[in-house]
Image: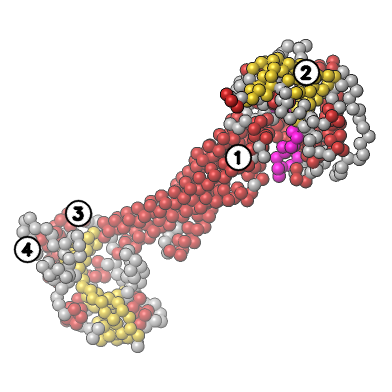
Amino acid sequence: MNTVNASKAQQTVAVTPDSTATTAAPPLSKTGSPLIRLIGVTKVYGAGQAELLALKGIHLDINAGEFVAIMGPSGSGKSTAMNILGCLDTPSDGQYLFHGAHVESLSRDQRARLRRRYLGFVFQGFNLLARTSALENVELPLLYRGESATARRDASARALQSVGLGGWEGHTPGELSGGQQQRVAIARAIVTEPAVLLADEPTGNLDTQRSQEIMELLRGLNTDHGITVLMVTHEPDMAAYAHRIVRFVDGRVDSDIPNPNPTKKQPVPATEGRP
Amino acid sequence: MMFNSLLLALRSIRRNLMRSFLTILGIVIGVGAVITMVTLGNGATKAVQTKVSVLGSNLLMVRSGQRHGHGGAGSGSVPEFKEADAEAILSQIGGVAAVAPEARASVTVVANGRNWSTNVTGSTNAWFKTGNWTLASGRLFSDDEQQGGAAVCIIGETVRRELFGGEAGVDGLDKMIRIKQFSSMVVGVLSSKGQGQMGGDQDDTVLVPLHTLQRRVTGNRIVGTLLVSMEEGSDSTPLKASLQQLLRERRKLAEGDDDNFNILDTKQLAETLSGVTQVMTTLLGAVAAVSLLVGGIGIMNIMLVSVTERTREIGLRLAIGALEREVLLQFLVEAVALAALGGIIGIVIATFASMILARVMEVPYMFDLSINLLSFVFSVGIGVVFGYFPARRAARMDPIEALRHE
């Protein structure tokens, strides 16, 4: 499975000069090595007495096209790891190679460029802009990429279509159910055609049925579009969709096991209202 | 990038219409106040200039007494002017077109069963020339009437209206009115001049021959003021100098003595008065500008609240790859767009307000392009200055913290 998806991912990760860039996005090269590689990553919060070691030397390789679930109790460091993987935070020590590029040595703006180019984010709380239509919400990342208005509109409409919300473009988050809001958020994450989708408890605010719909969507993105998916979750049912489950305990990787039988498509009763 | 920031800013202004309106209210009021004040001030200055020119632009007013203080009538030690002084000025100084001796007294006039408190002016026919007065109807005084102190009078429009009513400028002619203790025939009605430069009603007067006033009202031969009208185009400075010299001689002032009279130039008066209104305009404009500044602080306040309230939104924008300066620009553009919007609304409101107020205050409406432009530019500048701090705060947020914000 990895071979097909990896080629797709490498294609996506080709270096294109950013139109608005004054300093170009970091060069990404070295095919063959893992897409994501953490080497001895530690993260320290606070200083002196209040010092807290959130990550105690993490080693983790993730290949392009993988679907990885990250689990672990609260305070195990999984969120910290996720922030570092999402280039939102930098390690205190150790190395983070994103397709060969040393993220730990990038500036704030360089990391922002890397995020807008290669990463998509899905959050537990959806984080949609209130009183803003679904289409405008999905357009947001494209605005920062400097795409033209028509390109934005077309890509956003397509993204909404692909998450099953064709026809809902003009609705604001207040007019959508939780499941629909999360699907808008996923559309926003994939509208830039990212290499990696980072989902932080994407089903945490949803009931079982909506959760399964979202998981189906993520799995489809992984298998059909070759997007590497990293997902933090508490729920074993959701983690069961992934091909690999990494468990964090106390700031370390406790276990890292493949899931040979990921959950297959389940008979889902008719989804909530479409227009 | 600039265009996108503008788009984002306008979107968020639209999302919060009510708040956006309240935010810019300070700027609206500030800009509105500045423009209204300055426009009305300019109108008032113009009105003053117009009214002083009605008074007669080439007029020198000579009064007895020290230049500073109102020592004139009551001080005793200072000699009063006499009619002969007026004749001397006319005959001995070149460039003088007319000289009118003037004396005044407050009286109650009665006619037609009504009475009216006014002042009676005693002068000669030269008074018409020095004061730019014309007759609406009737005639001037005859020489005999002037010499003999006849019981005749010419009344101002206000007095005419109060006593006789009826048609302006006409009714009351050839009627008798009682001035203090004597009856007097109305031989003429003055054309209306309206409000004077000091705000008084110039039409509220009764003119009688100087001798009539002196004999029948005041009982003395004092002339309060000498009105000296210069010939058109003559320079007031040398004329004033020779007038001063002549009066010093006639009043037997020794070399080192101070003048015991003063000469007031209406041109000077006009300049002084418009100077005063201009200072007032500047002052009011400055006070209004302070309110504009307060409006700017209002914008900063709301922008700070907005940044705090939209912390998660900012976190999201940063997470999906917005650069620091893009977030900065978005909030800065938002503040500037708000301020500019406030400026435009303020200009519109000020235009209507000053049109209406100019009518109410009876001053001309004078559109001033430069103050409109200046206020607008200033309000935009306020948007930049007061929008920068909140915008920088937004741009420097940590995306992780911001996304966690409740």
Real-space CA distance between mark 3 and mark 2, rounded to the nearest whole angstrom: 98 Å
Sequence-wise, the earlier of marks 1 and 4 is: 4
Q: Pick the residue in front: B380 or B306.
A: B306
Disc number placed over residue B307 in the picture, else none: 1
**Mark 3 or mark 1: whose residue is earlier in sequence:** 3
Horizontal arrangement in the rendering, residue B166 relative to residue A10 (left or right): left
Q: Quadrant of residue A273?
A: top right
Residue denoted by label 3: B237
Q: Amino acid at mark 1?
A: Val
Sequence-wise first label, 4 or 3: 3
In whole angstroms, how far apart are the C-alphas of marks 1 and 2?
37 Å
Crowd tier of the residue under label 4, counting other residues whose Cα lies within 10 Å: few below 14, some 14–19, many 20 or above? few
Measured in 3D between alpha carbons, the distance from the residue under mark 3 to the one under mark 1, in whole angstroms, is 67 Å
- Quarter occupied by the C terminus of chain A: top right
Against A75, residue B90 (above or below) is below
- Residue B138 shows in the view: no
Residue type at mark 3?
A: Thr
Please tell me how crowded label 3 is: few (under 14), some (14-19), or many (20+) other residues with Cα within 10 Å: few
Look at discs 4 and 3 and give the one toward the viewer: 4
Provide residue B383's location: percent of width, then percent of height: 52, 41
